[in-house]
Image: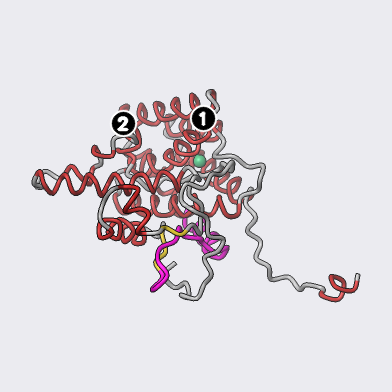
Amino acid sequence: MTDHPVTADPLPVNTIGGRSDHSGCLASRRPVSDSLATLNPAMSTRSARPSASPARLQRENTHDEIYEKIYVAILEHRLHPGTKLVEERLADIFSVSRARIREVLARLAHEQIVELYPQRGAYVAKPTIEEALDVFEARRLIEPAVLRRLIETLTPEKLARLRRHQELEVDARRRDDKRAVIRLSGEFHSLAAELAGNTALARSMRELSVLTCLMIFLYDAPTTTSCRADEHSQIIDAIAKRDAARAERLMLEHLNHIEGSMKLETATEEVDLESIFRG
Ligand SMILES: [Zn+2]
C-alpha cells in the first residue's frame, strides 16, 4: 500500500456515512478478545495496560473509541474504499481535536486500512487486484499453519470459544442481521489465529483479514455474501477431531471459494479496439 504513487486517484470519493447494500466482508482487524465487546471499546486490550494512568487511560479510550467506530464502519461496509476521511469533519463528529483524529488515522494507516496522501489527506484504502491476489496467496500459506498450531494446542476452552462464535454467526444469519454476519464471519478467522497462540501469525492474519474486507467490497461479485456458515462449522468439526489434514484442506477450499467469488482478473488481455469502435 505504501508504494502507491501519490498521484493515484482515490476516486470514487464517497462521504462519511455513505450506505451500502453490499455485503460480503470477511475480515476483522480488531483483536478478537474485543470482538464481543464491540459496543464497549473501552474494554479493548490496548486500553487495558496496567501501567496506564487514569488520564492516559481516558485519552486512549477515546482514541480507541474513534478507531473502533471507523474500523467497524469499514468492516460493515458503511464506509467504502476510497472514501475521503476529512480530519475536520471527523473532529467535529467525535468532538475531539484534529490532532486526535490524526493519531487515529495514523494508526489506521499503519494497519493499511487507510492511505495517507501528502496535501490531500486520508482515504479508506483501495487495495489493487495485484495486492488482492497477494493477500490470498499469503492467506493460503498462513491459515493452514494457524489451524495446525490450533489443533496442536487445542483445549476444551478453545473449542468452546470457536463453537460459541459459530453460534453467534448462525444466530446473526437467522436474524438476517447482515452487518453482524459480515463482522462475525470475518472474526472467525481472526479468532482461530488468536487461539492458535502465535502472536506473529495472529497479527499477520488480522492484517490480511482487513485487507480482504476491503478487497471484497471492491471486487466481490454482486451475488456473494460473507463466508458460508457451513464451511466454518465443518472446519470447526475437523478441529474438534484434531484432524489437521482435513481442517487444512477445508480451509484452503474455503479460501478458494472466497477468492473465486471475486473478480480478480487483471485486465491484461489484448483488447480489440477495432471491434469496439467500428463494430
Ligand atoms: Zn470464512
Instruction: Check disc 1 and give the amino acid type.
Output: Asp
Magenta residues (range): 117-139
Residue, disc 2: 155
Disc 1 residue: CB within 8 Å of ligand 1: no
Label 1 sits on a secondary structure element that is: loop
Residue at screen point 13% across, 49% down: 56
Q: Nearer the viewer, residue 90 or 141?
A: 90
Residue at screen point 59% across, 51% down: 259
Q: Is residue 56 left or right of residue 9?
A: left
Structural crowding at the residue carrying mark 2, measured as other residues with C-alpha within 10 Å and reported as few (<14), some (14–19) or many (≥20): few
Residue, disc 1: 177
The quadrant in which residue 192 appears is top left
Structural crowding at the residue carrying mark 1, measured as other residues with C-alpha within 10 Å and reported as few (<14), some (14–19) or many (≥20): few
- The answer to whether 209 is drawn above or below residue 187 in the figure is below
The first of marks 1 and 2 along the sequence is 2
Image quarter of the C terminus: bottom right
Q: Nearer the viewer, residue 65 or 207?
A: 65
- The answer to whether 33 is drawn above or below residue 260 in the figure is above
Question: Can residue 133 be found in the magenta stretch?
Answer: yes
Question: What's the colour scheme?
Answer: secondary structure
